[in-house]
Amino acid sequence: QLTNKFYQKTCPKLETIVRSVMTQAIAKEARMGASILRLFFHDCFVNGCDAGILLDDTPTFTGEKSAGPNANSARGFEVIDAIKAQVEASCNATVSCADILALATRDGVNLLGGPTWNVPLGRRDARTASLSGANSNLPGPGSSLSTLISMFSTQGLTARDMTVLSGAHTIGQARCQFFRNRIFNENNINASFAGLRQQTCPQSGSDNTLAPIDVRSPNSFDNAYYVDLVNKQGLFHSDQELFNGGSQDNLITQYSTNAALFASDFAKAMVKLGNIKPLTGKNGEIRLNCKKVN
Ligand code: HEM
């Protein structure tokens, strides 16, 4: 069972350290808040929030970093390492990498203008990571609404949780390979938006060129992602699936006009996301270096 005051006595400066490193990282590059939020999502969906995603591959072991959804895509590891170094200097061998990632995620969202929330703590770090789990549990950008609902349901999250957590796409960037098919071949897309993105991502251009996911305000954690969807400006096929005549349309419309509702539902859903199968008690370990097991 996770608790809010887990490190109150053993590492009182923890939250101050995380906040200060995240403040510097985001001042340097706003996108870092998005990248760390995505790391947390990809961690929690694979064997729970156990910092498995932070483990480097070794000559004998290939982990989550190399999985399809993460390779050449997941980023922000060096910021987590910088936080971990300061936390270790302040309270040695006490705070898990999984908890640092949960706190850094909360602060990244908040520093970009999103809500804040209390982060339940006490997670421990995995001694292993799951390449196959990362390849099978994480939804892809071509997913249908029913696939999205069922993949979140497997993790104990409702369709409403899925729809509000997808609001994370109000920040951050994506590579052309994940949305080229949509901007050239789909019909439920705003024509001038498709044209704009086609300029960045021509048919025969690089797969790795970046475009903002939220066309309105990619560095602000606001409800503009839902305004995009209502205007058929969702970047991924999977985004627009949430507003395409199906069960989530009504909720999308509500979030598009009610920023406060989105902010408060998002904060609650992030706590649920962070509660997915944590290692606690004597399970797992407190990793000394987030990149490798002790
Ligand atoms: C619902 C199913 C989801 C799908 C299919 C999906 C898919 C994707 C894809 C394909 C990218 C672009 C990756 C790249 O270009 O390298 C992306 C980026 C991102 N995703 Fe998702 N995602 C989903 C849900 C979520 C959730 C639940 C969160 C967090 C709570 C999240 C947070 C992000 C963020 C913040 C970025 C931008 C990262 C950056 O700029 O570094 N996504 N997502």
Image (cartoon, grey):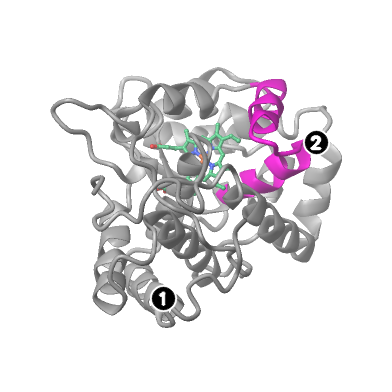
Q: Quadrant of residue 270?
A: bottom right
Which numbered marker is on residue 14? Answer: 1
Residue at x 39%, y 26% (from the top left corner): 177
Q: Quadrant of residue 59?
A: top left
- Neighbor class of circle 2 (other Cα within 10 Å; few <14, some 14-19, many 20+) is some
Q: Is residue 40 above or below residue 209?
A: below
Q: In the structure shown, which secondary structural element does the residue marked by tag 2 occupy? A: loop
Residue stretch in magenta: 144-168
Question: Viewer-proximal residue, 32 or 212?
Answer: 32
Whether residue 155 appears in magenta in the rendering, the answer is yes
Q: Is residue 172 left or right of residue 149?
A: left
Q: In which quadrant will I find the N terminus? A: bottom right
Question: Viewer-proximal residue, 105 or 256?
Answer: 105
Question: Viewer-proximal residue, 6 or 222?
Answer: 6
The number of callouts visible is 2
Q: Position of residue 14 (x, y in %)?
A: 41, 76
Callout 1 amino acid? Leu
As drawn, the residue found furthest toward the top would be 185
Residue at x 57%, y 70% (from the top left corner): 113
Q: Which SS type dominates the magenta stretch?
A: helix
Decide if ligand 1 comes within 8 Å of the CB at mark 1: no
Decide if ligand 1 comes within 8 Å of the CB at mark 2: no
Residue at x 45%, y 25% (from the top left corner): 133
- Disc 2 to disc 1, C-alpha distance: 38 Å
Q: Is residue 134 above or below residue 170?
A: above
What residue did someone put label 2 on?
A: 248
Q: Position of residue 276 (x, y in %)?
A: 59, 44
Callout 2 amino acid? Gln
Residue at x 27%, y 73% (from the top left corner): 86
Q: Is residue 186 above or below residue 273?
A: above
